[in-house]
Amino acid sequence: MRARLAGFSLERPGTLDEALGMLAASKERLTLLAGGTDLYVYLNAGVARPGRWLDLWGLDELRGIHEVGDHVVLGALTTYTELRASELIRGALPLLAQAAATVGAVAIQNRGTLGGNIANGSPAGDSLPPLLAYDAEIGLRSARGRRFVPFDRFYTGYRASVAAPDELIEQIRIPLGAGSSSRACRFVKVGTRAAQAISKVVAAFVLGRAGDGTVDHCRAAFGSVAPTPVRLRRLEQHVIGKRIDPALIRTSSDVLLSEIAPIDDIRSTARYRRFVARTAWQRFMEEVPGL
Amino acid sequence: MSDDCAEKTVETELEIEGRKVKVRAQMERQLPPWGKTTLVGKSLRRVDGPDKVTGAARYTHDVQLPGMLYGKVLRSPHARARVAELGLSAAAKLPGVLAVLGPGDVRGVRLGGREVLSAEASYAGEEIAALAATDEETAEEALSLIRVRWEPLPHVLEPEDAMAPGAPALQPGGNVLGGGFGPQTPGKPEVYERGDAPAALEAAEVTLERIYETPAAQHACLETHGAVAAWDGDGLTVWESTQGVFFVRSALCEALGLPASRVRVLCPFMGGGFGSKNSADRYTLLAALLARRSGRPVRMVLSRREDFEAGAYRPASRQQLAIGLTRRGRIVALTSRAVNPVGSALEGHYFGSCVGPVQDFYSCANVRTENYAILTSSPPPSAFRAPGHVQGAFALEQLVDEAADELGLDPVRLRLANLSANDPDSGLPYASNGLASCLRLGAKAIGWDSRKPPRTKTGRFRSGLGVAIATWGAGGGPPAVAQIVLHEDGSVVVLTGACDLGTGTRTVMTQIAAEELGVAVSAVLVANGDTRTTPYCLPSFGSLTVASTGPAVRLAAAEVKRQLLDAASPILGAPASSLLVMRGKVRHAVTGKSVAVASIAASLPARMIVGTSQRGPNPDGVVLASFSAQFAQVEVDCRFGTVRVKRFVSAHDCGRVLNPATWSSQIQGGVLQGIGYALLEQRTRDPGTGRQLNAGLLDYKIPTVLDSPPEIEVIDAAPPYPANNIGAKGSGEPPIIPVAAAIANAVANATGRRLRTAPITPARLLAALSAEP
Ligand SMILES: Cc1cc2nc3c(=O)[nH]c(=O)nc-3n(C[C@H](O)[C@H](O)[C@H](O)COP(=O)(O)OP(=O)(O)OC[C@H]3O[C@@H](n4cnc5c(N)ncnc54)[C@H](O)[C@@H]3O)c2cc1C
C-alpha cells in the first residue's frame, strides 16, 4: 500500500547552512531527500517515514568532484552519471566509474547519488565495495561541525550507521593513490539479469605488489554477503607478503569463505553467493596482470 | 450485407489457442490474390506511432472522467481460508468512501462460474471485498479499516502435495482432474491416442525417457489489468485494457443481466495482453458494481503487485516423455504424461494443454498423451502466448535433441527427416508448409555447419548452438466483420472490432484497406475496439487477428471500390470494368481519363459509400498452421553458471508478411519473452501463506534489452499461402514456442549437460556442471 502523502511535508533549504540549522533545530528526525531513487520506492511501497522531508537537491555545496591536496573529494550529491563522465574518476578511481555504470539504468544514474547510496546503507549498494576498497572516508557535517569517519567504520549494523540525527553526509574523501594504476583492480557485479538488477554479489578488489612480486597492498570488499558491505581483512592479511600462486589462491579462498555470511533470499541462495564470491576472487587473482 | 453470396452459410473450422472449434460462416466473394502491391509488404511506419510517443493515445490507465472514484480490492492474505466475520462499517464511514461491497452485496453476480467476491478464499490474492473512494490514498486507507476474522483452512501449493494421499480436497471431486483445454473428468487424465504407442516403444530400436519441468510464468504486461466503468441511466460504458471488447461485453451482459445494446466496451489502445486479457475479469465487474452503487464512474486499475498476485500466469508443468526411434533416426513412437498444476481453476477454465507438440510436431504413427490438471491453492492460470505449446516444446524439442545425440545424428537432419507432409493428427494436408525451409534457411544463417560436439570445448567460456521448431494452428477464421466508410471528401474510415495489442493491427489494416482501395495511407483512419461503433470479431488471441480481420477488411474495401467504380462509370463514360483506382483517383485503364475519388463521393446522394463484409469460411480438407525453426547461439560462463544468448535466428512461415517492420518486432518480442522464460522468470511463493514473494517487476525479472542478443535475425521462409484473400497466417505466438528449447539445446551443446528444468538459472547450471556427466 502506498503512503498517504498528507502525512508528509517537504522543505527546501536554500543553503547548506540553512539545512544544517533546520537539522539542529528539529526535535523529530528529518528525512533527507537527495535523488529520491530509494526514498520514492519506499513511498510507493508505503514504508517511507512520514513527517518532515528536507530536499537537498538544490544545495550546490554538496556537488562536485575535485582534487584537493592528495585526495579526491566528491560531494554527497554526485550522481552516477557524473561519476561515469568524470575524467578524474575514470583515471584515478576506475572502480567507482565502473560501479556507477552498472547502477539501474540511465534515468536512475542521472538522479541517484553517491551520498544516497551510502546513507541508504543497503548491503547490496553497488558503489559501496569500491569505496571500501579505496579507503574512503565519509565527511559528516552538522551545525556542530565536520568530522571524517573511515568508511569501514561507518556502518554499525544492517542499515545502521554512526551518523547522528542532525548530521548529513557532506562529502566523500578518497586518497589519490588508492586507485593507482600500478595496482591491479576489479569490480564485479553479479545480478539476475544484465541490467536493472539488485546485486546477488558485488565486489571490488585492489591489489599491489612489491618489486619482488609479493603482495604489498590488498583490499577485498564485498556487498550482499553480510548485513553490511564488508572488507575482508583476514583475507587481505592472508595474502600480504606472499606471492600469488595456485596455493595462495586456494588458501585465500578458504579464508574468504570463512569471512562472509550470506543468506538465502528471493534473489539468490547463500550457497550460490558463497560460490560466486569465491569464484570472483579466484578469477581476479588468476588474472592479475603480469602473473 | 451487400455481398452476392450473402445467404449461403456453411460450417467451418478454426483453431484458437491450439483448440479446434466449429463455427458457421457466410460464403465470401472470391477476390483474386494481389498482384504487385504498393503498400502491402512494405514497412509502413506505425500509423499510431506519433500518438503513442506524444502521449496522445489514451489507454485505459489514462481514462479520467468527471467525478471518477478509485476502486480497490481487499484480497485474501491466506492461501485458503474462510471469512468468518467481515466488518466493513469502519471503512464505509471513512470520509471520501462512497461505496463498499462484500460477498453478501454481490451474491449471484458470477464470472466463469464463480461469485465475484468470495467468502471463502481459494488462493492468496483472491477478492474478498471492494470499495471506491474519491482518491487512491483514501481507498487504500479504507481497505486497512476492513476487519476480517479469518478461519484458515489447510492448503496445498505444489501438485505433488495436492496428489498425495490425505491431501485436503480443494473441490468436491478431488484434486486430480483430466487436463486438456480445461480441467475435466475428475480422477482421470485426458488421453489422446493414435496407433499403439506403448507397443511401438517396446519394439523400438532405441528409446529414451526423460522428465522435463517448466515454471509458472507471468505475463507482466506493461499496462496492468484494469477497467473504468461509468453508468448513464441503465446503460454501462466500460473502458477495459483487453484483447477483445466483445468478450468483455458478453461477460458483463451475462453477469449483470443487461442487453448487449446497453453495454459499451472500449479499448482503442492497450498495453499488452499475451492471453491474460481475453475477457472481463472480476475487477471489471467490481468497477461496474461500485459505479452503480456510488452513482459515479469508478476506475479499477490493478497495482503491479495485484497484477502479479491475482492476475494470470502460464501454469507450470512436469512432463514425462518417451520417444522410440529406429537406429537411422525415424521416430516411431512418442508418449507424454503431463501434470499441469492449475490452481483453483474450475472445470472448463482454459489454461492450455502442454501435450500438443508431442501430437503435432512430427510425423509419427504411434502417439499417446496423458494429461492431468491438478488443483492447488493458487490463482487460476490463463492463456499465455501459445498456451501449452511453450511448455510442451521445451520438453519435446529437448528430447528430440537427446535422441539425436544418442544416435549420433545431426539434430537438424533428424528433424528434417521426421517432418510431416500432412497434419500428423488428422492426416490432412497443410494449406502451406514452409517448416523445412525454415530449418534450412535458419541453419545456414546461424552457421550450423560449424557446430561442434561438447567434448571439443574447454575453458571457462563455452559456446554452443541449438535448434528447435514449432507448429501452431494460426489460420484464423470467422467471425470477423469489417466496415469501411468512404466519406464525401475521399477520406476513409475502417471500422473493426479488433483490439491492437501493440502488435500493429491498426497499421496493417490501414495498409490492406489503402492497397485494395487505391487511396493514400494518409486518407485512411482505422477506428477499432468499440462494441457500439465497430463490428464484431473475436478477441486478438490465437494469432488470429491478421488472418481473420485482414481478409474481412480487404473484402469491405473491395466492396467500397465496386460501388465507387459504379458511381464513376457514368462520370467517365466508361464501364466500371475498365476503371481502376490509383493514388486517390479513379482512372480509365486505357485513356487515362480520371476523376478524383473525393468528387465522386461528394456527388453521391448519400454523400458516402459504406461497405460491410465478413470473413468467409476456411477451406475444407486442409489444415492451417504457421511454422518456425529457431536457432540459438549461446555462450556459457562455466564459472558463474550464466548463459548469454549471443545470436538468435528465427525463421518463420506465417504466409505473406504484410509489414516487415511490425512483423519483425512481433517476432523479436516473442524471442525476448522466450529468453526470459528460458533463463530468468519464475514465480516464488511463501509456502506458509501462498503469497507470492516476487510479485512485481523488481524481483520478477523479465529480460531487458541488455539481456537480448545484439541481433535477433528474422527470416521469412513462407511459401505462398492460398487459404485466405490476403495470403497471411498468424505470427503472434509461434515466435515464443521453440525459444527455451533452442537455448537449452545450445547450452547442452556448449557444456554436454542437459538442463531439463526451466529456467536455466546459474545455480542450476553450476549444479549440472559440477555433477558427474
Ligand atoms: C530502478 C532502480 C534501480 C536501482 N538500481 C540500483 C543498482 O543497480 N545499484 C544500487 O546500488 N542501487 C540501485 N538503486 C538504488 C538507488 O538508486 C541508489 O541507492 C542511489 O544511490 C540512492 O541515491 P538517491 O540520491 O536517489 O537517494 P535518496 O532516495 O534521495 O535517499 C536515500 C537515503 O539516503 C539518505 N540520504 C540521501 N542523501 C543524504 C545525505 N547527503 N546525507 C545523509 N543522508 C542522505 C536519505 O535520507 C535516504 O535515507 C536503484 C533504484 C531504482 C529505483
Image (tube, coloured by chain):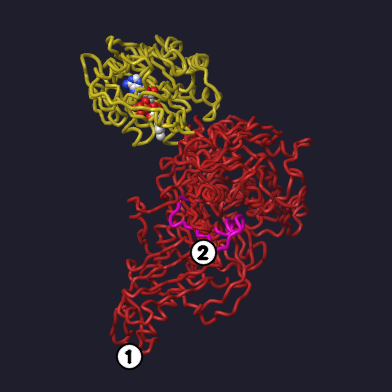
Chain colours: A yellow, B red
Instruction: Single out the mark in the foreground, 1 or 2.
Output: 1
Q: Relative to the observer, which residue lies in front, A240 or B239?
A: B239
Please tell me whether mark 2 sits on a helix, a strand or a loop: loop
Q: Is residue B43 visible?
A: yes
Marks 1/2 same chain: yes
Q: Chain of mark 2?
A: B
The amino acid marked with disc number 1 is: Gly
Residue B270 on the magenta segment: yes
Q: Toward which corner of the image does residue A165 lie, by quadrant?
A: top left
Residue at 40 percent of width and 64 percent of height: B526
Residue at 41 percent of width and 28 percent of height: A7
Q: Which residue is mark 2?
A: B729
Q: Is residue A284 above or below residue B186?
A: above
Q: Is residue A185 visible?
A: no
Q: Relative to the observer, which residue lies in front, B125 or B191?
A: B125
Q: Toward which corner of the image does residue B507 lie, by quadrant?
A: bottom left
Q: Which residues are magenta?
A: B249-272
Q: Relative to the observer, which residue lies in front, B252 or B94?
A: B94
